Amino acid sequence: MLGLPPFRYLRKTALVFVLLFLCFLGHQIFVSLHDSEESEQLNMEPEKIVYSVVCRNIVSGAPFGVDSTFPERSRLHYYSLVPKSLGLPKEEPLRHIWYLGVDTLQNLPCIVSDSICFSSISPELLHSGEWSVDLVQGRKLLASRQFKVEAAGP
């Protein structure tokens, strides 16, 4: 009866490859288990995400004309959906801060209705360049959107 050859006849390189394969297999199992735990945590807390967009208008309480590039001299709105489950304190108002590059052009409290918060910037203040709008409460940044304003044609 022939059995398996003893380990002393196996080459060292074969043992190294087997060891590397087992380490790789263990790592893959660990990563897949760890990723599934993180995805479960993300799926359990979608109500803690603030949705925000820059748009051309707000129609029936919903954003209309959402884009990332807008023409110069047009009125823009920043629309934010802030879930009540965030448990934000009422003492400090929500504010929208409009930036052109690094310059702050407008800092105003947003109009809150249910969990919808919005503000707008007048066409006179809207010049071409890289823009961003932040939704903040006190010193806490809740959401931010970047967009570009292009110069109107001749």
Image (cartoon, helix red, strand yellow):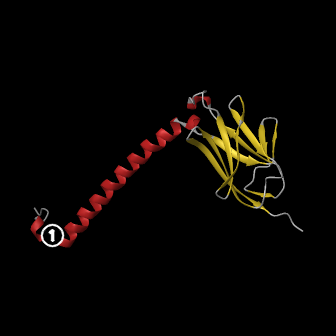
For label 1, the crowd category at 10 Å Cα-Cα, with few meaning under 14, some 14 to 19 and many 20 or more, is few
Q: Residue at 77% of width from left, 48% of height from top?
A: 55
Q: Nearer the viewer, residue 82 or 74?
A: 74
Tag 1: amino acid: Leu
The one nearer the camera, 94 or 6, is 94
In x, y percent, where is residue 67?
Answer: 75, 53
Residue 43: x percent and y percent? 52, 39
| Residue shown at the point (64%, 57%) measured from the top left | 102
| Rendered position, 144 above or below 84 | below
Locate residue 56 relative to residue 17 in the image: left or right.
right
Image location of residue 144, percent across then percent down? 63, 48
Residue at point 72% right, 41% down? 79
Circle 1: element type: loop
Q: Which residue is rendered at x = 60% and y = 27% of the image? A: 91
Between 8 and 118, the one lying in front of the other is 118
Q: Which residue is mark 1?
A: 10
